[in-house]
Amino acid sequence: MFRLCKALAPKQQWVACIYTKRSSSTTMSSWLEKPIKGVLLDITGVLYESGEGIGTVIPGSVEAVEKLKANGIPVRLVTNETCATRTAVINKLQVHGYKVSEADIFSPVPAVVAILKARGLSPHLLVHPSIEDEFKDVIKDSPSCVVIGDADEAFTFENMNVAFRTLMTMNKPTLFSLGFGKYYKHKGILQLDVGAFASALEFACDVKSEIVGKPSPQFFGAALSDIGIKAEEAVMVGDDIVSDVGGAQKCGMRGVLVRTGKFISSWESHSYVTPDFIADSLAEAVDRIIEAHKK
Amino acid sequence: MFRLCKALAPKQQWVACIYTKRSSSTTMSSWLEKPIKGVLLDITGVLYESGEGIGTVIPGSVEAVEKLKANGIPVRLVTNETCATRTAVINKLQVHGYKVSEADIFSPVPAVVAILKARGLSPHLLVHPSIEDEFKDVIKDSPSCVVIGDADEAFTFENMNVAFRTLMTMNKPTLFSLGFGKYYKHKGILQLDVGAFASALEFACDVKSEIVGKPSPQFFGAALSDIGIKAEEAVMVGDDIVSDVGGAQKCGMRGVLVRTGKFISSWESHSYVTPDFIADSLAEAVDRIIEAHKK
């Protein structure tokens, strides 16, 4: 069963935030002082490393997720993954040993489809071919908006131009971006993510994306609301310092960065995001959370 | 002979300007009040329309350029064209009937090569294949910067990723953008220009382009300096409301928009650039200038 993000406001916009660097008084040790009643997890780079086929599981991550659940700390997975259907993501996680279901995952595609239905919009798609079918109920003859996702190799010059020209025909160009990541690791190497290509269209058409996915506060909010906790009671763990960590902090959550996935060492002293904690992996982050939880 | 733009400062940056909409007191009739001692012209969309082969000359433009010269008003061509060598551009113009030489044209390629030489930088190129040869004197084994031009169909997903990864290997990523246009007309249809793809790399790498070409004030300044006049004595005529008209105005020139080339009607009430005059074509703009000049 798909759980649509009802909390997503129809006209949400997350415009390049001006982050305030946390002061040095917010030390890494203080992040465990307030109770943690729920944990949000990114998937790729936290639960498994991308790679050929289904990639490889990150050591200790399966056990970490189970440990959280065993200690009564609810977990939700929040991903901007739009290169595969949610069913395909679940299948991959289950093969890796994770005991998760579709209801645990919050991803941008069902969320944007719900928004398009609510606003009566028909999309032109610049997305990965594998998810095009999920839009079949909302596609009509003439597009009234453009939806851009991580199209991967479908980000051709021609496809970018078609999306651009489609926006230019609209009186009020409307662009939905499924997440707004800068880059991710694909088969071991960094690759440009949807935010880069959405930025190109934003610049050319003088338009701001409506972001559906991390770091949109509404998107995080839907997962928190599903658990039934406030932002200050939650921790987000991810491998993207801007979308995961900075985005979570902006919503009032604590943001933990892991040194797995697309982590790069320069992020240890990132110019505008200071994680509440940097863990070698999810396993280390969860060990700290459980220790504090038991006190 | 190539005339390099010596006036280009080594670390020029033209960062998304905040234009101030001109007040209504700057009416369209007042643009001819101050003497005009030189005219800068964009090429594509002002002198000829792009299209199959060499495109088609814009009626009246050849005569307009001659009329300016005959009235003692010097003309320089300032273009962001990087899909062809300067020699190829000149050849095309001469076939259309224009009496121009390479010394009349200011284009980004020789300017950026001069900057690279002066700063001892070796570029990774994401440019149109036809101009790669012009960089042969500055390319060494290991790139220390990326140069992005209007690569046209060479803006593949793979090429964008290679440029991105090259920037990510640098301690201080350095990106030169040859112009920063939003889009242009190619064979009759709008196509994304270099500024869109440079924006994608800027976003992904947290870097600001050093722009070589319009609307960089240094680039306009090199052409003005070549004529030997001040900005307030010059008029720039172009079909790009932001790079040509807005850029010229920001430098203190008057900016005239033509309703040829990539002109779109919504620019008549553009949100942040108000042209000093909007002419149906270069011919009309020049007629007005000459009339005022003779008074």
Image (tube, coloured by chain):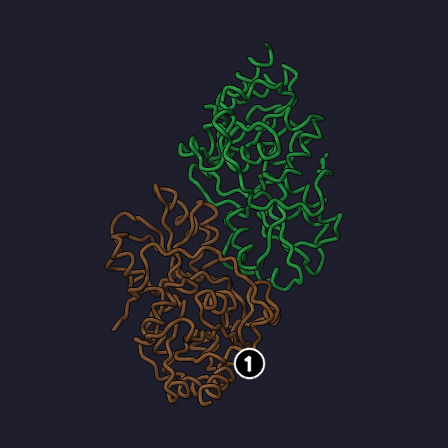
Chain colours: A green, B brown
Image check: B115 left or right of B18? Answer: left
Give the position of the N terminus of chain A as an image quadrant: top right
Residue drawn at x 34%, y 68% is: B222
In this view, A221 is above or below B121: above
Q: Quadrant of residue A244?
A: top right
Q: Quadrant of residue A230?
A: top right
- The answer, for residue B39, to whether it is visible in the render is yes
Please state the horizontal and vertical placement of residue A178, each as a whole percent of the image: 60, 45
Is A236 in front, or is A70?
Answer: A236
Please state the horizontal and vertical placement of residue B64, each as a whole percent of the image: 44, 85
Residue drawn at x 59%, y 9% is: A295
Is B156 in front, or is A243?
Answer: A243
Image check: B291 left or right of B27? Answer: left
- The kind of residue tagged 1 is Asp
- Chain letter belonging to callout 1: B
Residue drawn at x 62%, y 40% is: A216
Q: Secondary structure at mark 1?
A: loop
Please state the horizontal and vertical placement of residue A252, each as a whole percent of the image: 61, 31
In this view, B128 is above or below B70: above
Local packing at callout 1 (Cα closer than 10 Å; few below 14, some 14-19, many 20+) is few
How many marks the image carries: the answer is 1
Please state the horizontal and vertical placement of residue B31, each as a whole percent of the image: 51, 77
In this view, B140 is above or below B246: above
Residue under numbered circle 1: B280
Is B99 in front, or is A34?
Answer: A34
Image check: A213 left or right of A53? Answer: right
Image check: B8 left or right of A249? Answer: left
- The answer, for residue A63, to whether it is visible in the render is no
